[in-house]
């Protein structure tokens, strides 16, 4: 039997997709794999990770799709021989055969690779949090202390990223106004110590990039 996906919370690769893409990038460097002539391609890799941690490459049946993304397809097949950390899915302590999918986008995996990449396209003209805004929100939710209250509340958070990759000029605007919540939000963001990844020309810019982050809370 082959399950169509991994059980919730399980990953086929230790460290998840961030570590998978980091290892792919390193394998490209170590093995001097050539760049694609047209890097703006994308191939969705589908693997069967077997009980013994071996993997089977499942070829997409759409030959036109493969032809239009030939380099990304070839890279997908080539890179697998350098990846050996696969973990089978488990249920009730029993190992399973399961399908695992991820995207290969050559443009993101060669010289333009950034640490923290996890398969989501990156806008390289703006500062990026390692792992993306979803990871920023996850860390924020670990640190935020919600004051006792009833009903719903929203808060707009504004901040800039300085040329050292740090958050500055933090402003909060809650609705309805709640001073305690605003202070807790500022405290939670201050505990996130990761430096943001900056565009190559950020040092020469006269204006710092400004983020707007909407937050919504529901109290019971």
Image (spheres, rainbow, N blue to C red):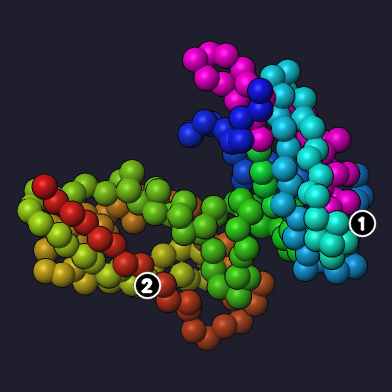
Report the side of 197 relative to 105 (left or right): left
Residue 113 is covered by the magenta coloring: no
Report the side of 43 relative to 124 (left or right): right
Among the 4 quarters of the image, the one containing residue 53: top right
Residue at the location (58% across, 67% down)?
198
Residue 85 is covered by the magenta coloring: yes
At which x and y percent is residue 158? 33, 72
Q: For the N terminus, which image quadrant?
A: top right
Residue at the location (85% across, 56% down)?
63
Instruction: State the SS at label 2.
Output: strand
User: Which residue position is annotated with label 2?
Assistant: 212
Residue at the location (36% across, 67% down)?
213
Report the side of 162 relative to 42 (left or right): left
Q: Which residues are magenta?
A: 71-99
Q: Residues within 10 Å of mark 1 (few under 14, many from 20)?
A: few
> From where the camera sits, is residue 123 visible?
yes
At which x and y percent is residue 161? 46, 70
Sequence-first tag of 2 and 1: 1
157 and 91: which is toward the camera = 91
Residue at the location (48% across, 33% down)?
9
């Amino acid at each position: 039997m082959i399950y169509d996906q991994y059980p919730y919370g399980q990953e086929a690769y230790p460290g998840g997709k961030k570590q998978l893409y980091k290892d792919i990038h390193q394998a490209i460097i170590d093995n001097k794999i050539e760049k694609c002539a047209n890097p703006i391609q994308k191939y969705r890799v589908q693997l069967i990770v077997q009980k013994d941690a071996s993997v089977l490459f499942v070829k997409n049946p759409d030959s036109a799709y493969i032809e239009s993304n030939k380099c990304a397809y070839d890279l997908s097949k080539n890179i697998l021989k350098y990846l050996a950390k696969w973990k089978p899915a488990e249920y009730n302590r029993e190992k399973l055969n399961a399908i695992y999918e991820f995207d290969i986008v050559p443009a993101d995996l060669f010289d333009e690779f950034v640490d923290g990449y996890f398969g989501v396209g990156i806008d390289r003209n703006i500062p990026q949090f390692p792992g993306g805004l979803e990871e920023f929100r996850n860390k924020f939710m670990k640190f935020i202390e919600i004051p006792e209250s009833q009903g719903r509340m929203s808060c707009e958070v504004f901040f800039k990223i300085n040329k050292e990759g740090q958050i500055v000029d933090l402003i909060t605007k809650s609705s309805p106004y709640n001073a305690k919540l605003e202070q807790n939000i500022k405290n939670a963001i201050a505990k996130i110590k990761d430096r943001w990844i900056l565009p190559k020309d950020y040092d020469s810019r006269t204006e710092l990039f400004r983020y707007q982050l909407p937050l919504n809370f529901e109290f019971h």
